[in-house]
Amino acid sequence: MPTTSLALAFSLSVDSFAVALGRGAAVHRTKPSSVLSVGVAFGICQTVTPLAGWAIGIAFADVFQFVDHWVTFFLMLAVGTYLIASAGPADQQRDVDGHFRFLSLCAAAMASSMDAATVGLGLGVIEHDIVETVAAIGGVTFLMSCLGVAVGRYVGHMLGRWAGISGGALLIALGLKVLFEHGAA
């Protein structure tokens, strides 16, 4: 596997790791099934979104380049705002059985994967061979997300409600970064 694909995979998995860290911090006990569900959700989204972006990039490169950053920004703003608004005291955030709400998990996974869609779009515009790259992105994200939940579980007592606030702020900051990189803000 080329170094470029692995470097891209690690850079795209950082935001998933941070969100997973916050999710792990918000639970009292983490079951292996919960760790795996977060890893699978983030891994699948990080695999599918660059693939979808790549396909769109090939088909509609001229049109999509004008709105991709706005879509990314608004998704990250919405999920980030939700995470901040729902961050209560640590004892209110803890989920005794360790399972994560499905819709919240999907929304967080999808929002943190929008940058991967943008990368995929760029790879489609330059007609890059995508299979090896998306395999690396999905695999690394799966591992980093599982690690984030596991580590978050142990540092959660130190982070409390700030984990949700910082995770939400990170998503909003990433959305703003996308806007500034595209010169839209």
Image (cartoon, rainbow, N blue to C red):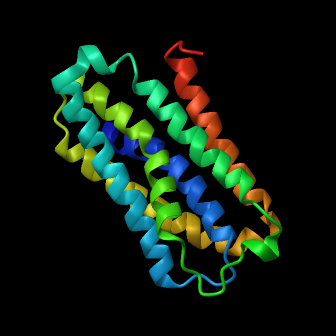
Q: Can residue 42 be seen?
A: yes
165 vs 149, nearest the viewer: 165
Q: Is residue 166 left or right of residue 80?
A: right
Question: Where is the C terminus found, in terms of image quarters?
Answer: top right
Tell me which residue sits at (57%, 19%) in the image. 180
Image mark count: 0
Q: Where is residue 18 in the image (x, y as percent from the top left)?
A: 60, 53
Tell me which residue sits at (22%, 30%) in the image. 56
Q: Is residue 124 left or right of residue 107?
A: left
**Relative to residue 184, is residue 68 depicted above or below?**
below
Q: In this view, does 157 lie to the left or right of 98?
A: right
Q: Can residue 126 be seen?
A: no
125 vs 168, nearest the viewer: 168
Residue 150, quarter of the rendered image: bottom right
Q: Position of residue 64 (x, y in %)?
A: 31, 21
Tell me which residue sits at (38%, 39%) in the image. 116
**Relative to residue 59, is residue 26 depicted above or below?**
below
Q: Position of residue 8 (x, y in %)?
A: 39, 39
Q: Position of residue 98 (x, y in %)?
A: 59, 81
Q: Is residue 53 left or right of residue 24?
A: left
Residue 176, quarter of the rendered image: top right
Tell me which residue sits at (23%, 34%) in the image. 54
4 vs 41, nearest the viewer: 41
77 vs 129, nearest the viewer: 77
